Amino acid sequence: MADFGGDVEGFRAEARSWLEANFPRSLRDNSGALEEAMMGARRPTGDAELWRGRMAQKGWGAPTWPAAYGGGGLTPIQARVLGEEMAAIGATNPIVGMGTSMFGPTLLEYGTEDQKQRHIPPIVRGELRWCQGYSEPGAGSDLASLQTKCEDAGDHWLVNGQKIWTSGAQYADWCFCLVRTDTARKHEGISFVLIDMHQAAVETRPIKLIAGSSPFCETFFTNARVEKNDMVGPLNGGWSVGKRLLQHERSGQGGGRMLGTGPSLPELAKTYVGVDAAGRIADADLRSRIAAHMIDARAHALTIRRAASEARGNQNPSATTSIMKNSSTRIGQEKAELTLEIMGSRGLGWEGDDFTPAEREAVRGWLSGKAWTIFGGSAEIQNNIISKRILGLPDPLGANAQ
Ligand SMILES: Cc1cc2nc3c(=O)[nH]c(=O)nc-3n(C[C@H](O)[C@H](O)[C@H](O)COP(=O)(O)OP(=O)(O)OC[C@H]3O[C@@H](n4cnc5c(N)ncnc54)[C@H](O)[C@@H]3O)c2cc1C
């Protein structure tokens, strides 16, 4: 555990005693259930709701956001200490979702004072769910081709068009959305608006995924109303706002579950493949590939930690988030592949009692992990960004990339 000196150690003591008094022990190491309660069909109840309410009141669900909008007002170092203390007792942040990870930080940078006052506090309290209306049937990697139209209707805006792959749209209260406000210009004809999902003009149709669940939707807007004060950034100036949001999205994909979850690969291999006379994984080739994977995962984790400790103050994410996203998703997918390989025929389970829950989960995890190198911009698009924005190579398309 890092030692940051007197003041910070004082904060550590404060955080530890508050967590001791307020974190319900029934939620220990239960981040999956909490995440489901915040982002899925169910709303938090019981101890999950108690924990959400307490963290909301303290502002520690968004620890570094300004206290003026309900955030914790902590320094990045204090926030890290809070994270360490939470991890030490198996506590996770109950206030998760696109509001805290993507939209909130973007609004804090680009929003008007009125927009921040209206939209940030409910996010900090974990009361409202946000979804992302970016992709369209004809605009994915080439996002700036989007066609969803937004027209001036006097005292409000009118939005017509279709979005696709809108994660959690069926449960969302609000959508941050890129729309076309000028058909003559491409990137300079896009605006960033906030759409209330609780209106008859919005229809969501869930799409079933290969892994069996329906995490995202087709979303249709038919004369959807947007208030005049819910455009973020200037008219036709939404591309910069939208790109910054994508950087926040990718910075959240540089670690955590994208690195793969589940038991350690050596333990798994010893169980399924067996051990040699020296107690090592019996298959020498598999053993060296697992070792190479673990070295990559460790190097990635240390790089993330170094980058975080080198960052001074509340710096916004940059194009380097593309490197972290590609690195973490590759490592996570590799872990899922190795897991199935280790399980052999036991790694083919889908449903029924012939396979253990962990074996069935491994298959579903492997399938859903395929999406990691697609959402938030595909791996190839991240490579384009790295080559242009970080390496300074020429852009063959001359495009204003994401
Ligand atoms: C699980 C999941 C959740 C998602 N959630 C959301 C969401 O909440 N909101 C939202 O708006 N979108 C969401 N998306 C959509 C996601 O952002 C798009 O799928 C992604 O941007 C790719 O767009 P596309 O699917 O249209 O593929 P395409 O753009 O058609 O790309 C197809 C293939 O061509 C490659 N390619 C395209 N252009 C280039 C190029 N210039 N150079 C090199 N290769 C290229 C791509 O890398 C890809 O492999 C989600 C996607 C998934 C899988």
Image (spheres, helix red, strand yellow):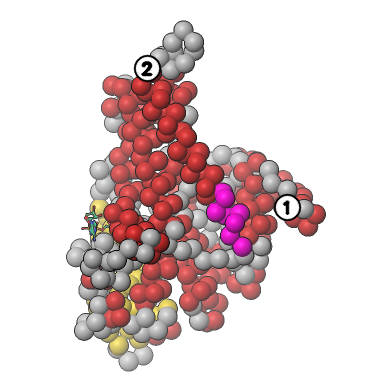
Q: Are marks 2 and 1 in contact (CB under 8 Å)?
A: no
Looking at the rendered image, the quarter that the N terminus falls into is top right
Residue at the image position 42 percent from the left and 80 percent from the top: 233
Badge 1 residue CB within 8 Å of ligand 1:
no
- Percent of width and height locating residue 156: 35, 86
What residue is pinned by disc 1? 4
Q: Residues within 10 Å of mark 2 (few under 14, many from 20)?
A: some
Say which mark, if any, is on residue 157.
none
> Tag 1: residue type?
Phe
Which quarter of the figure is the C terminus placed in? bottom left
What residue is disc 2 on? 283
Residue 54 shown left or right of residue 209 in the figure: right
**Left or right position of 287 against 57:** left
- Alpha carbon of mark 2 to alpha carbon of mark 1: how far? 45 Å
Q: Is residue 71 above or below residue 194?
A: above
Residue 68 visible from this viewpoint: yes
Quarter of the displayed picture in which ligand 1 can be seen? bottom left
Q: Nearer the viewer, residue 369 or 18?
A: 369
What residue lies at 32% left-to-right and 26% top-to-bottom? 341
Magenta span covers which residues?
305-312
Image quadrant where residue 335 sits: top left
Q: Residue at x 30, y 71 (%)?
A: 400
The answer to whether the residue bearing label 2 lies less than 8 angstroms from the nearest atom of ligand 1 is no
Residue 200: percent from the left, percent from the top? 30, 72
